[in-house]
Structures are given as C-alpha cells and as structure tokens.
Image (cartoon, helix red, strand yellow):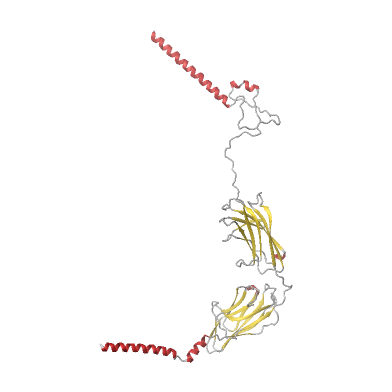
C-alpha cells in the first residue's frame, strides 16, 4: 500500500511540473518573437499621388487629367494591397457613376482592371488584378513599389453647384500606414450659368365625372399639374398616388387610369396599394411645367357600399426607394360603387297605357255579333282634356274573343238536348214492340 501511495505522489508531482513548465514557457517567450508578431499585423504601405497632367481645372464633359499612383512597401516582407479611391468624401453633393470619368493603367504592376462603384451618394473607384474577383488585391513585394496611371475627368452630368472634385486614396482592408495616405483636389470650371436650386409645386384640378358618366362618385376625373422652377433635378421624378379610405374599409379596390399618348391606360397598384405614375423628365424637357390626366373609380371587388369620402395624395420624389418627397398635394372627393345594371323582362306582360283612349264598336259590328265570333274594333279619340285615367283594365264593348266561347257552349247544350230526346224516343219504341 505504501508503494501505491508513493506512485500517486509521483504522478501528481509530474503533472504539476508540466503545468508550471507550460506557464513558464508562455511567460518566458522571447520578447523579440512577440515584437515580430505585432509588427506583422501593422499596416505598412504608403501611397503617393503625382501631379495631374495637364494641370488646370476640369470642365464638365471636357478633357481628362492623368496622374501617377504609387504604393510602396518599406518592409522585408510582401504585403497585400486593395486600392480604393473615394470621391468628394463628406460632401453633401451626391454623385452618380456617370458624373466622373475613371480609368487605370498599369505602369510597373500586374495587368489591371478598374470598376466604378456608388454608395449613399458617394463615388468610388476601385482597381484589381485583371481576370480576378474585385475583392482580390495585389501583392507588393518586400522593399518594392507598384505604379499605375490614373485618369480622372468630369461627366456632363457633374453637379453644377460643385466647383471641385476631391479624390482620396485608401484601401478596403486598412493596409495604409499612419500618415501614408494621399489625396488630390481637382478644380471644376463654373457651369455656363449660375446654378439655381430646382423647386417643384404640384396641385390637383377637379375635372368632374369621367366621359360617359354623369355621376362624379362613380368615376372621378382629375388633372395633376407640375410646376418646375430653377435648374434641372438630379434624376427623373417619381410620382406615387395614394388613395386614403376610412379605416373600416379593408379592401377598397381602387382603380386608377392615366392618359398616355392619347389613350387611357390602367395603372396597377403595388404591394402597398399605391399607384406609380410614369417618370417625369428631370428637366421637364425645357418646359416650365407638365401634367397627368387621371381617372379614379372603384372596382367590382370593393367593400365600399355607399358614397364615401376619400383622399387622393400625390407624392413626388427623386428616388423610388427613398422616402424623401420634394412635393406633395392632396384632394378630397367621394367614391361610390358602380350601380347594378337594370334588365327588362324577356316577355313583358302588356299593360294599358296611361294615355289609352276608350273604344267602342260600330253599329254594323254590333248587329252582326250573334253570327260571328269576332269583329273589328274601331278606335275613337276622346275629347281633349277628358282622357280617362288608367284603371288597369278596359271595359268590354261589342264582341271579342269570348263571344266564340259563348257560342260554343250554346251549341253543346243544343246537341246534349237532341241526344236526350233521341234516347227517349228509342225507349218508347222498344216498349210498344214489347206490348204487341
């Protein structure tokens, strides 16, 4: 037993020695190795941008300028490089892809492709190794440099209220050493005329009922007017129509039509029940205003059962996916469900007219009533101002279709009497023969 106790003590002692050795190994790791691992994780690249050629301000839709972009790696180990150029960072002026001309050519670097991106109104220029994914970067050798020529210009649509374009060099993976970034500012010539802020006003005009109807509640016709002032907008205008109904109506089944090229065209509602009108040109094609002719009514599946007050709102925006509106207008009117169609009976029963005049038979027709089952009826015009009121039936005068019925009954009675007389005579004859 003392041997087993001695073995257990030996095992516990060995385990403790291993733990202490492991901890000691961690604590006693050479400081030089730790410093090397930290150094490897630090950004080391530096970017330099040369002077643009030719120098001078850029013009919208005019000549471009070119400059050198050089990235250097001063360390003894290769480093990755994911270049990213940002335009007008922090500026309130939004830019589209077409607002800036961008091109990249390799000088002392692998074959290169470029790409223009856009996010939250900001402009982005990226380049990457040709034939690879945009997310893949370059490798800058140790103690070496890579150089590209970058071309920049302004598109014709570059905002007129901006007199410069700022370009900042960065990377998508935080690879630039502190103080190793660079930027350029390109001056832009003023636009041909001073920039004026674009403004828009809208309003509805009531045009009564739709063509072919006399009831405005069955089909309402309106005109949506646009009045534009100042310079052009940055994009075509998006108009959304919203029909607001009482909260207890779950399915109004509102229908909208718009006049396009002289024809009424149905506008299908989106998933929110709103109606998107065609785009309005951002510069109104040089005109101070424009309009849409509209028709609004209820469809056959509506839950509205009587004339109900609704509100029609038009909201105009520069982007369908953004909530900001540059103009709104509303109007109120009543809508009612379509009236059910009235149908006539297939075989209507003849009823006397309220203007029917009394009739009487002629003397010659009356005298021949006993020998004919029908006779002609000659209408007689009543004196003016003495037309009798309709009572639902007219009095009979002279013979009509019932005369033949009475004549037939009389003939049947005569035939019945003759038959009875014949039977009586036969019985008497039989009795006489029997007595003889």
Looking at the rendering, which quadrant does residue 258 occupy? bottom right
- Left or right, 250 with respect to 419, comes to right
Q: Eyeballing the image, is 352 above or below 98?
A: above
Q: Which residue lies furthest to the left in this view?
A: 1
Q: Eyeballing the image, is 315 above or below 434?
A: below
Could you say where residue 61 lies in the image, as x and y percent from the top left? 69, 74
- Left or right, 137 with respect to 285, comes to left
Screen quadrant of the C terminus: top left
- The residue depicted at 33 percent of the width and 87 percent of the height is 12
Looking at the rendering, which quadrant does residue 205 occupy? bottom right
User: Is residue 112 or residue 405 the one in the foreground?
Assistant: 405
Looking at the rendering, which quadrant does residue 124 occupy? bottom right
- The residue depicted at 28 percent of the width and 88 percent of the height is 5
User: Is residue 378 or residue 309 the one in the foreground?
Assistant: 309
Screen quadrant of the N terminus: bottom left
Could you say where residue 240 lies in the image, as x and y percent from the top left? 62, 62
Q: Residue furthest top?
A: 436
Q: Eyeballing the image, is 420 above or below 169?
A: above
Mark count? 0
User: Is residue 353 or residue 361 the one in the foreground?
Assistant: 353
- The residue depicted at 45 percent of the width and 14 percent of the height is 424
Could you say where residue 267 lies in the image, as x and y percent from the top left? 61, 58
Could you say where residue 97 lies in the image, as x and y percent from the top left? 63, 73
């Amino acid at each position: 037993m003392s041997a087993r106790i001695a073995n257990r003590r030996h095992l516990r002692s060995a385990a403790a020695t291993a733990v202490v050795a492991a901890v000691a190994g961690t604590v006693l790791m050479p400081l030089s190795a730790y410093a090397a691992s930290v150094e490897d994780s630090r950004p080391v690249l530096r970017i330099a941008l040369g002077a643009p050629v030719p120098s001078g301000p850029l013009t919208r839709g005019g000549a471009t300028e070119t400059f050198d972009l050089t990235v250097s790696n001063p360390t003894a180990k290769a480093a990755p490089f994911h270049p990213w150029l940002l335009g007008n960072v922090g500026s309130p002026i939004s830019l589209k892809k077409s607002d800036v001309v961008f091109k990249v050519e390799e000088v002392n670097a692998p074959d290169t492709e470029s790409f223009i991106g856009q996010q939250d109104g900001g402009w982005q220029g990226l380049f990457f190794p040709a034939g690879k994914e945009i997310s893949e970067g370059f490798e800058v050798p140790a103690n070496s440099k890579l150089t590209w020529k970058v071309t920049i210009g302004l598109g014709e649509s570059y905002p007129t209220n901006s007199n410069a374009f700022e370009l900042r060099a960065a990377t998508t993976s935080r690879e630039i050493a502190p103080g190793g970034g660079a930027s350029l500012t390109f001056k832009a010539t003023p636009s041909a005329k001073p920039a004026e802020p674009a403004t828009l006003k809208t309003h509805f005009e009531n045009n009564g009922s739709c063509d072919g109807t006399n009831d405005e509640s069955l089909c309402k016709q309106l005109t949506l007017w646009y009045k534009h002032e100042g310079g052009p907008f940055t994009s075509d205008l998006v108009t959304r129509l919203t029909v607001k109904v009482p909260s207890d109506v779950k399915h109004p089944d509102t229908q909208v039509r718009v006049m396009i090229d002289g024809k009424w065209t149905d506008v299908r509602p989106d998933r929110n029940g709103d109606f998107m009108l065609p785009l309005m040109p951002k510069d109104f094609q040089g005109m101070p205003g424009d309009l849409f002719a509209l028709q609004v009514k209820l469809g056959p599946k509506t839950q509205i059962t009587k004339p109900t007050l609704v509100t029609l709102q038009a909201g105009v925006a520069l982007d369908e996916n953004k909530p900001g509106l540059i103009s709104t207008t509303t109007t109120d009117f009543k809508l009612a469900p379509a009236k059910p169609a009235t149908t006539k009976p297939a075989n209507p029963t003849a009823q006397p007219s309220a203007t029917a005049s009394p009739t009487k038979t002629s003397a010659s027709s009356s005298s021949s009533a006993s020998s004919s089952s029908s006779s002609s009826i000659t209408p007689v015009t009543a004196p003016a101002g003495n037309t009798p009121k309709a009572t639902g039936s007219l009095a009979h005068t002279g013979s009509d279709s019932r005369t033949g019925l009475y004549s037939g009954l009389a003939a049947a009675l005569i035939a019945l009497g003759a038959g009875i007389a014949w039977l009586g005579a036969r019985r008497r004859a039989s009795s006489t023969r029997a007595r003889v």
